[in-house]
Image (cartoon, rainbow, N blue to C red):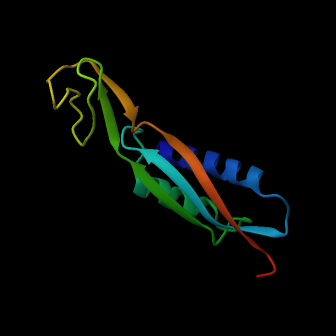
């Protein structure tokens, strides 16, 4: 279950982004590519489990899945697909490049004042 180690790394990144103790994390937004191999439900569960009894308790994780976008080097067609067999839907070429879908990053950390 590598989602647990990913959740731990996300928490490390989030903690580094908090300016000082007057701020509390409200939401962590993460973008996960379809090809990343990350199980989104497992990532959410892992995050929620390990923030208990920490300064991040009560924060939410919002995960957006990035679709698989391919580019054909032969006919220059760019297209989205749900298929894991990489061929061009326009010319059937296998000269394919992945343009999006293998990302995994924290895109935003939403903070609120501890005074709220």
Q: Residue at x 53, y 53 (%)?
A: 30
Q: How many marks?
A: 0
Quarter occupied by residue 37 = top left
In this rendering, position of residue 27 left or right of residue 75: right
Residue 65 in the image, given as x and y percentages of width and height:
40, 51
- Outermost residue to the bottom: 116
* Quarter of the C terminus within the rendering: bottom right
In front: 115, or 89?
A: 89
| Residue occupying the point 43% across, 36% down | 102
Within the image, what quadrant is residue 58 found in?
bottom right
How far across and how far down the image is residue 101, in percent? 39, 39
Question: Which of 19 and 69 lies nearest the eye of the viewer?
Answer: 69
Give the quarter of the image for residue 49: bottom right
Can you give x and y, in whole percent of width and height, for residue 22 in the image? 84, 69
* 72 is higher (above) or lower (below) than 51: above
**Of residues 32 and 71, the one drawn nearer to the viewer in this rendering:** 71
In the figure, is residue 28 to the left or right of 17? left
Image height check: is 54 above or below 34? Answer: below
Query: Which residue is most to the front?
Result: 76
**Residue at 41% in and 58% down:** 41
* Identity of the residue drawn at 26% across and 29% down: 77
Estimate the x, y position of residue 80 in percent, counting from the top left. Answer: 28, 41
Q: Is residue 56 above or below residue 115?
A: above
């Amino acid at each position: 279950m590598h989602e647990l180690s990913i959740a731990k790394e996300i928490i490390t990144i989030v903690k580094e982004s908090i300016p000082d103790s007057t701020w509390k994390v409200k939401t962590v937004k993460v973008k996960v590519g379809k090809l990343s191999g990350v199980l989104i439900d497992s990532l959410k569960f892992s995050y929620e489990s390990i923030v208990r009894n920490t300064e991040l308790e009560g924060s939410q994780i919002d995960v957006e899945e990035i679709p698989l976008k391919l580019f054909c080097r032969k006919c220059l067609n760019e297209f989205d697909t749900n298929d894991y067999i990489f061929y061009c839907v326009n010319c059937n070429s296998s000269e394919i490049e992945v343009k999006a879908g293998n990302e995994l990053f924290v895109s935003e950390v939403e903070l609120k004042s501890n005074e709220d």
